[in-house]
């Protein structure tokens, strides 16, 4: 018990910060209540440092360093998101006060609970990364999601936000029920909730002719439920409505935190069934017979999900006329891209960065988090003043039209963010997309990689539409009412701007970091390190144990011919 | 040293936003002239070496570690072919800046800043010896061009910019997938990832021909869009017509060459067997491009559009020469890259100068300019002749070599052994049909010259107004009024180096041919080796089917004759 708690210092720190923030939010003194945001930031920084410093190597897992980097990623992007979220809950009220509709009441400004909910969500994400058993994982996933329902409702006073919150809540409950159902089946098939124990049982079953059908059903249901978190295809329907209804900063958070939690969980659960013959685990002989394929129905189902997610996300994004809906569908598509790397799995070398799909996913999550903040922060900084004096969000294409002529700096950040999402070199987005291609090939998934390529091209079309609206068009009549918060007398307006700049710097500078000691690729590589559980070294002679040394790959010529066969 | 060629324009580009409007032009000129001087110094310091060297000039190699985890480094190097193309890029740099002085009067900082960035990216493409760095530079040329077309172009500029961006981006992402596959093929054998050009070349060549077939297809999808090869060319006329003069010049001069260079330096040496298997199809597409697009040129009334389409036609010849895959054809093709950059670049300059004065590009509205602008007319006739391929000027040498290479690219003709031929899949018929394109080329170019330069003087009515509804920045009437009727000294200085080079390369192309001789010979040798593997596969189950649409596919002349 004590050992388990000792792996949780970052979460404990964050939880304590959350309690402090909640108390601060209750104070009658405005100056004390204003401390909520800085205290939250301090908590996140402390949690990040603790995650880096105290998270032990998890020897019982196939992913020894995953927890540490997962938590670090949560802290880093969480810090950026916090900047965006600062002041969001107050904007509507302040606008009402500014327009003279409400009397100013100091007790109603700066809602501590908003920050507290955000920190809870990040705590959940960190717990997800460190989960070692199914119940823990389930609770962590719920801790990620529950606060987000409230945050959507709090984020803006409009009815649309309420509708989003309700929609998100019910569908979220459905998703949670499905993956809980899956967890139950997994427990039924293996007799344990401990991930390490489940892995052992699955490996044993795999050697005896295949994983128990109940176990496979359980994993499939878990994947289906997690598709809700990552906004992948059969469970993606809520995405555009919810993303559009929530205030932009909260949308940015929705696009990252649950998605990251979903991918962490997928990695942990898929690592239990293993990629037959991958970095160390021999669970099943896959149908294709090559290394790195998931057990039979799981691999196929995930492939179908990935293809549909990418394609539907991108094709529907092309048809949208609202910026936030475009970004919502593109968020669906990005999940599909990451699924490609996840299907490819740890690759034949186990630890080697580019062929390791886990590392690719971690890198992509970092890149997606940063770019997402950059794009949404621009939307958050802008506001539309309506004829009756109330403010509203910038949403339609018409409202970002001519952004370059009105706010050059914002337009630059917006463009960089969009190009980053597009994966345009030499931005960080490109170097995150490259490992997806690399791991996809390494897993031998020719069709998936090509579909990924074609989808990136489709995505370029609507990203370019956004860019051309912001850069090339002249401001429309409706866009005349669009102001940036820099001019509006509202609190919390600056933070979003700072965040945008920070994200932009990250996009450009992270690839340059590579020259110095700070190497995102090195982090991702460590994060994705995949090895066998001690005592469970594979029996197949062509699989390695935990050696990073390259192994003779089974017949490269055969694989070189495999596209031929596919053709 | 090579890094300097990339960093100098970049440094100038970073400086530009902080300057006053007046200094920008000078700094931009300096930012393109300094690399040119540096490039010259590099060439002179190499002396005679670089010409006879096969492969990279070792003294110029430079490696900067970047992302070892992904197998990416920044490795720079030059061989004789990329060296020549870098020189072309460096020469066109100052010309781009010079020609924009009066044409661009608004948002000058943005304009020159992006021109300098473009210059750096293009130099980077030719110098890159790591494929990811190559890809980065290759793609990054899109952004400056996008900005140049979309902010400084004419009426339909937005559609043109988006189409240009999407076509190229789509193609090159497929090419990237192919490149990553080759890197993976290498990694699967050795356990380490590398995108180094030499490593990838060796790895890719060892692939079976069937794998090479579809990889070549993937790479060609990326590079042929940029060339542009016949069915993928539709973005080009639009982009050319809408781009500002400097944009057109650099588009025709260098950006199209990125495609042909990538095919010559990456696709063919990496996947020789794939190249052989695709030869007939690509040659037919190239000929269609040359002849059919030539006919399209004939019916154009917009001078700039005509020259833009003629670019597609000319690059058809270039591709035909390249896919002759013998030394003559390859040499002709490389020479054509340079020649086309010089003569078509100059034609775009001339059209830009005319447009600045008369605000129209329509042959229906303007004519007989020889009377009003004799110096301009002289240059126009000169470069049109160079473009047509008048013997004595540069176009002739390369066009002739390309066709001759295609003619030679078969060792049998009419069923008997063809002594002058090299083993290959093309043959005299290809050259004969392509020869029709030369006639068509002469027709439309002379038609254009006849209408615009000769005949009775005809000027548009609203000479000082905004011609053709082009009401947006850059071409304000007041400014055009300040230009003299004929060319200014600055404009003559812009054109003279190009004219000199055209004349020099037409009369004495030997230095260039000598320089690229080794390179083409070794490419040819690769092809001969690969032919053995392809031949060994022929008829086997894994030989990919030749596309049915290709009616000239049969490998040797005899069968081909039957097919006709």
Image: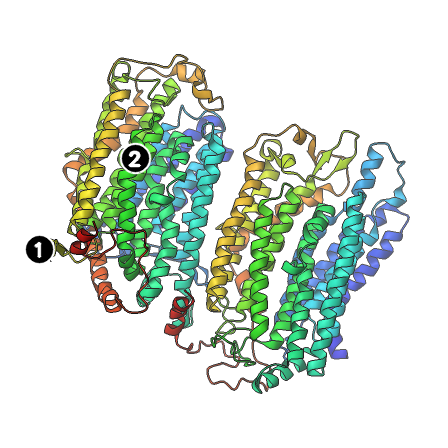
Residue identifier under label 1:
B419
Per the model, the C-alpha gap separating discs 1 and 2 is 34 Å
Instruction: Report which quarter residue A297 is drawn in.
Output: bottom right
**Is residue B11 in view?**
no
Which residue appears at 32% of the width and 33% of the height?
A: B296
Please rate how many residues cluster around mark 2, counting C-alpha atoms within 10 Å: few if below 14, some from 14 to 19, many from 20.
many
- Say which mark, if any, is on residue B310: 2
Colouring convention used in this rendered image of the protein: rainbow
- Residue in the foreground of this view, choosing between B29 and B518: B518
**Is residue B108 in view?**
yes
- Residue in the foreground of this view, choosing between A208 and B453: A208
Q: Is residue A212 above or below residue B120?
A: below
From the top left corner, tell me how far across and down residue A20 is, in percent.
83, 58
* Contact? badges 1 and 2 (CB < 8 Å): no
Instruction: Report which quarter residue A320 is drawn in.
Output: top right
On screen, residue B55 versus residue A538, left or right, reads: left
From the top left corner, tell me how far across and down residue B434 is, in percent.
21, 42
């Amino acid at each position: 018990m004590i050992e388990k708690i000792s792996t949780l210092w970052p979460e404990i720190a964050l939880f304590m910060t959350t309690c402090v923030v909640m108390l601060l939010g209750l104070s009658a003194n405005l100056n004390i209540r204003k401390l909520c945001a800085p205290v939250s930031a301090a908590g996140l920084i402390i949690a990040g440092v603790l995650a880096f410093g105290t998270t032990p190597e998890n020897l019982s897992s196939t992913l020894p360093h995953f927890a540490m980097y997962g938590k670090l990623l949560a802290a880093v992007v969480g810090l950026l998101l916090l900047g965006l979220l600062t002041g969001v809950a107050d904007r509507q009220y302040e606008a009402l006060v500014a327009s003279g509709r409400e009397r100013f009441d100091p007790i109603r400004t700066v809602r501590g609970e908003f920050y507290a909910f955000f920190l809870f969500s990040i705590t959940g994400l960190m717990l997800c990364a460190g989960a070692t058993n199914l119940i823990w994982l389930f609770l962590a996933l719920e801790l990620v999601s529950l606060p987000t329902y409230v945050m959507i409702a709090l984020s803006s006073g409009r009815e649309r936000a309420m509708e989003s919150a309700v929609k998100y809540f019910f569908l979220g409950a459905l998703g949670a029920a499905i993956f809980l159902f899956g967890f139950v089946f997994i427990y039924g098939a293996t007799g344990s909730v401990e991930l390490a124990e489940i892995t052992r049982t699955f490996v044993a079953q795999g050697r005896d002719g295949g994983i128990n059908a109940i176990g496979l059903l359980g994993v499939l249901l878990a994947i289906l439920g997690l598709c809700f978190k990552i906004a992948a295809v059969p469970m993606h329907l809520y995405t555009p409505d919810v993303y559009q209804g929530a205030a932009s900063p909260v949308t940015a958070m929705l696009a990252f935190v649950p998605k990251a939690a979903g991918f962490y969980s997928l990695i942990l659960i898929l690592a239990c069934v293993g990629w037959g013959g991958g970095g160390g685990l021999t669970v099943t002989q896959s149908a294709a017979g090559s290394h790195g394929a998931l057990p039979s129905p799981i691999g196929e189902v995930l492939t179908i999900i990935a293809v549909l997610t990418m394609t539907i996300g991108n094709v529907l994004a092309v048809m949208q006329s609202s910026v936030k809906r475009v970004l919502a569908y593109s968020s669906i598509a990005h999940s599909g891209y990451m699924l490609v790397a996840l299907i490819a799995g740890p690759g034949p070398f186990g630890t080697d960065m580019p062929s390791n799909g886990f590392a690719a996913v971690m890198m992509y999550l970092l890149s997606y988090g940063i770019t997402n903040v950059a794009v949404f922060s621009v939307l958050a900084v802008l506001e539309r003043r309506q004829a009756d004096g109330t403010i509203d969000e910038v949403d339609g294409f018409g409202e970002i039209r001519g952004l370059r002529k009105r706010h050059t700096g914002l337009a630059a950040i917006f463009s960089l963010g969009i190009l980053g999402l597009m994966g345009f070199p030499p931005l960080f987005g490109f170097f995150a997309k490259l490992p997806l291609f690399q791991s996809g090939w390494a897993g031998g998934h020719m069709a998936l990689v090509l579909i990924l390529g074609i989808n990136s091209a489709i995505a370029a079309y609507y990203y370019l539409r956004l860019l051309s609206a912001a850069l090339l068009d002249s401001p429309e009549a409706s866009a005349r009412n669009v102001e940036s918060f820099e001019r509006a007398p509202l609190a919390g307006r600056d933070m979003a701007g700072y965040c945008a700049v920070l994200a932009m710097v990250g996009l450009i500078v992270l690839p340059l970091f590579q020259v110095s000691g700070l190497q995102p690729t090195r982090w991702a590589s460590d994060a994705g390190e995949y090895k066998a559980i001690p005592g469970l070294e594979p029996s197949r002679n062509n699989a390695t144990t935990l050696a990073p040394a390259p192994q003779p790959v089974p017949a490269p010529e055969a694989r070189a011919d495999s596209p031929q066969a596919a053709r | 040293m090579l890094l300097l060629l990339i960093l100098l324009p970049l440094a100038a580009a970073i400086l530009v936003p902080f300057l006053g409007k007046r200094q920008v032009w000078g700094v931009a000129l300096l930012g393109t002239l300094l690399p040119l001087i540096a490039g010259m110094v590099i060439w002179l310091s190499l002396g005679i070496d670089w010409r006879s060297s096969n492969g990279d000039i070792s003294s110029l190699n430079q490696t900067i570690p970047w992302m070892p985890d992904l197998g990416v480094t920044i490795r720079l190097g030059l061989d004789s072919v990329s060296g020549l193309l870098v020189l072309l890029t460096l020469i066109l740099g100052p010309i781009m800046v010079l020609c924009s002085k009066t044409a661009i009067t608004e948002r000058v900082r943005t304009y020159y800043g992006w021109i300098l960035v473009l210059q750096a990216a293009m130099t980077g493409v030719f110098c890159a010896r790591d494929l990811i760095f190559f890809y980065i530079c290759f793609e990054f040329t899109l952004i400056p061009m996008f900005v140049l077309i979309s902010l400084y172009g004419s009426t339909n500029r937005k559609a043109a910019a988006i189409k240009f961006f999407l076509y190229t981006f789509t193609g090159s992402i497929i090419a990237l997938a192919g490149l990553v596959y080759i890197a993976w093929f290498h990694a699967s054998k050795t356990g380490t990832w590398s995108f180094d050009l030499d490593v990838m070349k060796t790895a890719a060549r060892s692939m079976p021909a069937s794998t090479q077939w579809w990889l070549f297809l993937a790479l060609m999808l990326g590079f042929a869009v940029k060339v542009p090869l016949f069915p993928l060319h539709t973005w080009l006329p639009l982009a050319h017509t809408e781009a500002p003069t400097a944009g057109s010049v650099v588009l025709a001069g260098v950006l199209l060459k990125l495609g042909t260079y990538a095919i010559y330096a990456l696709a063919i040496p990496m996947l020789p067997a794939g190249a052989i298997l695709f030869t007939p199809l690509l040659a037919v597409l190239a000929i269609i491009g040359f002849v059919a697009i030539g006919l399209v040129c004939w019916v154009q009334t917009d001078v700039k559009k005509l020259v833009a389409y003629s670019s597609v036609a000319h690059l058809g010849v270039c591709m035909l020469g390249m896919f002759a895959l013998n030394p003559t054809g390859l040499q002709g093709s490389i020479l054509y890259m340079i020649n086309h950059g010089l003569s078509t670049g100059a034609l775009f300059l001339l059209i830009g100068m005319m447009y600045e004065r008369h605000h129209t590009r329509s042959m229906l509205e303007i004519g007989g300019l020889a009377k009003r602008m004799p110096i301009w007319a002289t240059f126009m006739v000169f470069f049109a002749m160079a473009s047509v391929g008048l013997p004595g000027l540069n176009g002739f040498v390369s066009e002739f070599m390309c066709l001759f290479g295609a003619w030679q690219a078969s060792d049998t003709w009419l069923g008997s052994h063809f002594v002058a031929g090299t083993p290959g899949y093309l043959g005299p018929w290809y050259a004969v049909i392509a020869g029709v394109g030369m006639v068509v080329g002469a027709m439309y170019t002379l038609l254009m010259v006849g209408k615009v330069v000769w005949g009775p003087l005809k000027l548009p009515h609203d000479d000082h107004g905004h011609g053709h509804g082009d009401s947006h920045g850059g071409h304000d009437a007041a400014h055009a009024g300040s230009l003299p009727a004929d060319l200014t000294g600055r404009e003559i200085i812009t054109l003279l180096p190009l004219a000199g080079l055209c004349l020099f390369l037409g009369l004495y192309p030997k230095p260039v041919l000598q320089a690229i001789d080794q390179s083409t010979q070794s490419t040819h040798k690769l092809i001969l080796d690969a032919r053995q593997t392809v031949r060994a596969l022929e008829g086997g189950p894994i030989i990919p089917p030749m596309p049915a649409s290709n009616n000239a596919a049969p490998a040797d002349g005899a069968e081909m004759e039957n097919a006709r």
